[in-house]
Amino acid sequence: MNTRGNLICERKGAACDFIVPDENMLEVAQWIVQNTPFDRLYFYGNDKPLHVSYGDEHSRAIVLMLPGKSGRLVPKVVTAERFCDQRKNV
């Protein structure tokens, strides 16, 4: 809820961005995918914070944020199976 009492996200969930110091964030993200009922997970890189949301939908959407030709990040949705097969140097 925002300061006016309105929902920030219409999916009625909660989200956070975080990084675990001295850990490979791909391994952290893969653990989340394999062990939690998340709604959406955005992966920006091994050494970048994760964005994870939780809500009623539990859609388990995994989005890789990859650099495009212009240098801007471009979202690419992948399956949990494909994501968990990724190596450490994504």
Image (cartoon, helix red, strand yellow):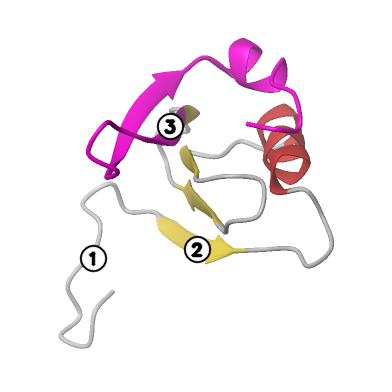
Q: CA distance from mark 3 to mark 2?
A: 15 Å
19 up-or-down from 53: above or below? below
| Residue drawn at x 55%, y 39% as measured from the top left | 38
| Figure quadrant of the N terminus | bottom left
What is the magenta range? 62-90
Residue 74 included in the magenta stretch of the image: yes
Place residue 85 in its image quadrant: top right
Where residue 46 appears, x then y in whole percent? 66, 46
Where residue 65 appears, x then y in whole percent? 41, 38
Residue extending farthest right: 22
Q: Nearer the viewer, mark 2 or mark 1?
A: 2
Taking the image as shown, residue 52 lies to the left or right of residue 4, namely right
The disc at residue 8 is 1
> What amino acid does circle 3 point to?
Val
> What amino acid does circle 2 point to?
Cys
Do callouts 2 and 1 mark residues in contact (Cβ within 8 Å)?
A: no
Residue identified by numbered label 3: 63
Q: Nearer the viewer, mark 3 or mark 2?
A: 3
Q: Secondary structure at mark 3?
A: strand
| Residue drawn at x 62%, y 31% as measured from the top left | 90
Q: CA distance from mark 2 to mark 1?
A: 13 Å
Q: Secondary structure at mark 2?
A: strand
37 up-or-down from 7: above or below? above
Where residue 12 appears, x then y in whole percent? 32, 53
Taking the image as shown, residue 69 lies to the left or right of residue 67, namely left
Q: Secondary structure at mark 1?
A: loop
> What amino acid does circle 1 point to?
Ile
Do callouts 3 and 1 mark residues in contact (Cβ within 8 Å)?
A: no
Residue identified by numbered label 2: 16
Where residue 50 appears, x then y in whole percent? 56, 53
Q: Nearer the viewer, mark 3 or mark 1?
A: 3
Taking the image as shown, residue 68 lies to the left or right of residue 55, namely left
